[in-house]
Every structure is written in C-alpha cells, then in structure tokens.
Image (tube, rainbow, N blue to C red):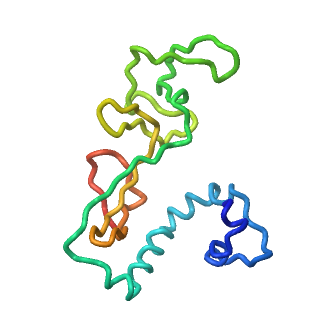
C-alpha cells in the first residue's frame, strides 16, 4: 500500500490515476475472503500463463513443488488450549509474561486466540516453532516461474493431497 503512494507503475497496474486517492490498507483485509472465493488469483495466473511469450518459456519436463512458511501476525502467547485450561501467571495487563516450560503444545490441542487459522510449524529440527501458514506453488524449474497453486478451498496441512490449478 505504501508503494501505491509514489510508484506510478503500481498505480497504473491497479487502475489509479496520478491524482487519485490511494485506498486504505483495510480495503484488502475486508475483501480477502471475497477475492479467495472468486478465485481472482487463479484467473490472473491462468491469463498470464496463456500469453504467447510466457508459453515459450514453459517446459513440460522440469516441474517441482516449492513450499514456504508464511509467518502469521499472531503472538505465540495467543496460542492457548482449546479447552481453556491454561495456567496463566498473574501479571500486569492483558499481555502478561507466560511460561511454556514443560507444556506440550500441538495444533490438535491448542489454537491461537487472535488468528485461529494459523498453525504451529517449524522449518526443521532444532528450529523454533512459530505460528504460520503453509504456502505452496507448482514451479517450472528451468525459468523459475510459478505455474500452479493449490485450490484455496483446501486447508494447508502437512501430508495432505491437494488439487492444483
């Protein structure tokens, strides 16, 4: 949103004139579900891949699935037991210090109170667990182009089959 204030190319891409006011950042947050349900991103990606210049870059042999963890804006303190049986320490304010020592936390028994869709993941052994979303894309390896994304209606969970578009 900040780049829309001064970048003319961004303004042109979204249809804003030079003197048009830029939207408030909450516009995207309010319309996120509508955009996902309408599958706007899938339609946009399909239109880009249909371009003759892009078709020449695609190989039919060199594909892989690329994944990443997108960190949620929820604090690890908000990751509480679903049954509400947390041992909270007494402290000043609503954001008091909390000790997680010797407490087993998992996505089956716990959930974030501020972002219920975020899940607890870690990138590898010895790495800290964080509240994240999983993101995947089907990549064409020769030129590094994203050519497919899983259906937005399916939840992003490990070891789960996905439909690709």
Where in the figure is residue 23, as x and y percent of width and height? 73, 64
In the rendered image, which quarter is residue 50 located in? bottom left
Q: Is residue 81 above or below residue 155?
A: above
- Of 112 and 15, which appears nearest the observer? 15
Residue drawn at x 47%, y 23% as measured from the top left: 83
Q: Is residue 129 left or right of residue 61?
A: right
Where in the figure is residue 102, as x and y percent of width and height? 39, 14
Q: Residue furthest left?
A: 61
Q: Is residue 81 left or right of residue 155?
A: right
Residue drawn at x 48%, y 74% as measured from the top left: 44
Where in the figure is residue 6, as x and y percent of width and height? 71, 67
Q: Is residue 24 left or right of residue 75?
A: right
Residue drawn at x 25%, y 77% as measured from the top left: 59
Q: Is residue 10 left or right of residue 164?
A: right
Residue drawn at x 72%, y 65% as measured from the top left: 5
- Of 145 and 131, which appears nearest the observer? 145
Q: Is residue 83 above or below residue 51?
A: above
Q: Residue furthest top?
A: 90
Q: Is residue 81 above or below residue 154?
A: above
In the rendered image, which quarter is residue 114 located in? top right
- Of 95 and 125, which appears nearest the observer? 125
Quadrant of the image for the C terminus? Answer: bottom left
Quadrant of the image for the N terminus? Answer: bottom right
Q: Is residue 98 above or below residue 161?
A: above
Where in the figure is residue 80, as x and y percent of width and height? 50, 26
């Amino acid at each position: 949103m900040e780049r829309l204030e001064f970048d003319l190319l961004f303004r042109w891409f979204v249809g804003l004139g030079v003197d048009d006011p830029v939207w408030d950042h909450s516009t995207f947050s309010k319309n996120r579900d509508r955009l996902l349900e309408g599958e706007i991103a899938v339609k946009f990606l399909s239109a880009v891949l249909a371009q003759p210049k892009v078709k020449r870059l695609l190989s039919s042999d060199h594909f892989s699935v690329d994944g990443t963890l997108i960190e949620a804006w929820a604090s690890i303190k908000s990751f509480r037991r679903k049954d509400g049986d947390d041992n909270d320490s007494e402290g000043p304010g609503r954001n008091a210090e909390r000790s997680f020592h010797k407490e087993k936390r998992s996505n089956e028994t716990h959930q974030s109170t501020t972002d219920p869709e975020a899940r607890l993941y870690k990138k590898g052994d010895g790495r800290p667990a964080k509240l994240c979303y999983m993101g995947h894309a089907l990549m064409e390896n020769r030129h590094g182009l994203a050519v497919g994304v899983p259906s937005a209606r399916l939840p992003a969970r490990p070891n789960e089959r996905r439909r690709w578009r």
